[in-house]
Amino acid sequence: MKEKILVLGKGENARSFYEMCEETGFEVTLLESVDNLNSYLKDVGIIIRFMEDSLDIPSVEGAGSVTGSQTWLCESIGRSATSMAKEAGNPERYVGFSLSGLFPEKKLVELTGGERTADDAVATARDLFEKLQFTVVISRDHPGYILNRVVASMINEAIYVSMYGLAEMKDIDQMMRLGANFPMGPFEYADSVGLDRVLKTLEWLTEELGPQYRPCPLLRRKVEAGFLGRKTGKGFYAY
């Protein structure tokens, strides 16, 4: 693996990943501006793009940035790896990833190849994350992937239970913490990960798999009101 890495993003996640690579000894650059982007892309082996806090780089993938043996890793939020790879200059080198950002100390990553992704591109991504001491899980390219699909479905059901007046939010959270031994309840989890991100995952699941994943109207109203959780100071709870 050519261990020269370019991290694209201007938020906390991108900077944290950059620092992790630097501490591990990789030759790594963090790009927080699109100025002279092409000059950075020429001689890197791996490009890592964080979507949630990414730069506004229209069709950077389609500009010939992914060529030859260069591998592109892109954070997968609300889209399939195959769909995102269509925008890439070389979809065979394209791998989606999803970090367990809520519990960064656990260092867990889910890797997903698209329909055209080459096996050695996935192997390159695995090698990178394992050198960074992540636990790597390989997932097929399916809606929501593993963690987001299961957690978003649980959160959605909990919101329906609350909306129909079957139980209070705090009681549902306490039941799941104590009865199921979860580190936090579904409403606490939703507020921590971001209600907009939960909604986006559920919309993707609904579009591809059917109405059983339709987002609860209460969740959609919260997002429309701008109550996204901890990052806005208010979600299901106030902070």
Image (cartoon, helix red, strand yellow):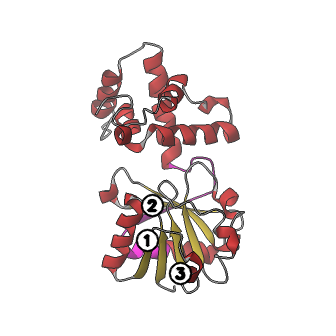
- What label sits on residue 109 in the rendered view? 2
Question: Which region shows up in magenta?
Answer: 126-146
Identify the secondary structure beneath mark 3. Answer: helix
Q: Position of residue 199 (x, y in %)?
A: 53, 37
In the image, what residue occupies the spot 39% across and 33% down? 186
Mark 3 / mark 2, whichever is N-terminal: 3
Quadrant in the picture for the C terminus? top left
Residue 181 quadrant: top left
Above or below — where is 50 with respect to 234? below
State yes or no: residue 142 in magenta.
yes
- What label sits on residue 40 in the rendered view? 3
Instruction: Residue lying at the far top in this picture: please name it.
Output: 165
**Between 65 and 97, the one nearer to me in the picture:** 65
Mark 1 / mark 3, whichever is N-terminal: 3
Q: Which amino acid, mark 3?
A: Tyr
- Label 3: few (<14), some (14–19) or many (≥20) C-alpha neighbours in 10 Å: some
In the image, what residue occupies the spot 62% across and 47% down? 143
- What label sits on residue 2 in the rendered view? none
- What label sits on residue 129 in the rendered view? 1
In the image, what residue occupies the spot 42% across and 32% down? 227
Q: Which amino acid, mark 2?
A: Val
